[in-house]
Image (cartoon, rainbow, N blue to C red):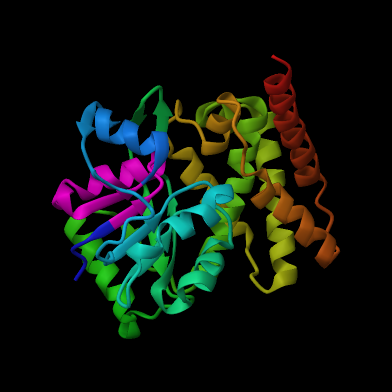
Amino acid sequence: MISRISIVGMGAIGCAYAEQIIKTFPIENISVIADGNRARNYKENGITINGSNYKFKIVDPTQVCEPADLLIFSVKFHQLDEAIEGAKFHVGPNTIIISLLNGISSEDIIARRFGMEKVLYALNAGIDAQRVGDEVISHQLGTTYFGEEMNRPESYSVKVLQLKEFCDNTGIDYIIPDSMIKTLWWKFMLNVGVNQTSAVFRVPYGIVRQVPQLRRLMVDAMQEVVEVSKKTGINLTQDDLNECLRVIDGLTPTGKTSMCQDVEAFRQTEVDIFAGTVVELGIKCQVPTPVNDMLLRIIKATEDIFRYNSLNN
C-alpha cells in the first residue's frame, strides 16, 4: 500500500499531481525534495495551486529519511541527473518510481541508478497545467498511463496493482496499456508535434489546432515520428497519429505547452529529446526528417539568442 510519497520537481505537472493527491491523501505524508533558494521559498511562501496555498514537507536532498512508497520525478529532462542524485535517500527496497518526464528514455536512465525492478513506465496525456507568475493553474489533469513494458489484466505485477489502487483512491484517471513502450512513443509523437510547433510560434493550443498551416506543420512533424517508428519496430500508425490529434483538440484552447512556456520565459527547452531524437533516429534508420530538422534548428537558434541577450544585457 502506498502511504508515503516523495516528489522531485514542483513545476506545473508536479503541482497538478500534488493537488489531486492531497484531496484524499494526508499532505504531511508528501515530501517535496528541494534545496537552496527553491526550498527556502517553498518553506516561507508555500506553493500556490489554483488559488490555494499549500505548505508541503520540504526535504533537503542530503537529508537521510524514510524511503518513499512512491517516488515521482517531474523535472525537465536536463535536470534529471541532478534529480536522481537528490532523491537517493527516498528509494528503498519497496519504492515504486515513476517518471512524468517527456521523451522516451528517462525510465532507462533512472533504472541505471536504482534498478528497473523499482521503475514503472509512466506518462501523462491531456494535462493543461501551466505556471502563471508564482502560481500553477491546472484545469484538467488528463490521463496517466503506466505499467511495465508489457501488461496483461490477468497478470499485472505487484507494482502495477499498487499504483492502480493508489490512483483509484486518489481519483487520478489512468490507463494501463498492453504496451507501455509503444504508448511512450505515442506521447513522444504528440509532443514532437504540438510542443515544438507551439514553441516556435509562441501560441496556445487553440491557435495551433485552428490555424491550418500550423496544424499542418504539427502533423508533418508527427508523421516523421511514425515513419521512424516503422524502422525501429515500434510501428506507430495513422490511427495513433489521429489519437494524438483527438487529445490535442480536447485541450483548453488558452493553455500552453511546457515548451512554449519555456520559450516565453527565456529558458532552455527540451528540443534535444524531441526533434533532436527524431533527427538522430532518422539518420540512423535512413528516414528523412526535414520538418524536425527545421524545428531543431529554429528552437536551438532561439535558445542561442536567449544566451546572447543574457550575456550582453
- Is residue 128 visible from the viewing direction of this image? no
Is 122 rendered above or below residue 76? below
- 85 displayed left or right of 218: left
Q: Residue at x 52, y 32 (%)?
A: 205
Q: Which residues are magenta?
A: 6-33
- Could you say where residue 234 lies in the image, as x and y percent from the top left? 64, 70
Which residue appears farthest toward the bottom when viewing the image? 155
In-front residue for pair 105/83:
83
Q: Is residue 287 magenta?
A: no
The image quarter in which residue 55 lies: top left
- 72 displayed left or right of 110: left
Q: Residue at x 48, y 39 (%)?
A: 249
Q: How many marks?
A: 0
- 182 displayed left or right of 255: right
In-front residue for pair 4/35:
35
In-front residue for pair 50/221:
50
Quadrant in which the C terminus appears = top right
- Is residue 86 visible from the viewing direction of this image? yes
The image quarter in which residue 181 lies: bottom right
- Could you say where residue 246 lies in the image, as x and y percent from the top left? 49, 46
- 51 displayed left or right of 62: left
Q: Is residue 31 magenta?
A: yes
Q: Residue at x 65, y 52 (%)?
A: 273
Q: Residue at x 74, y 36 (%)?
A: 300
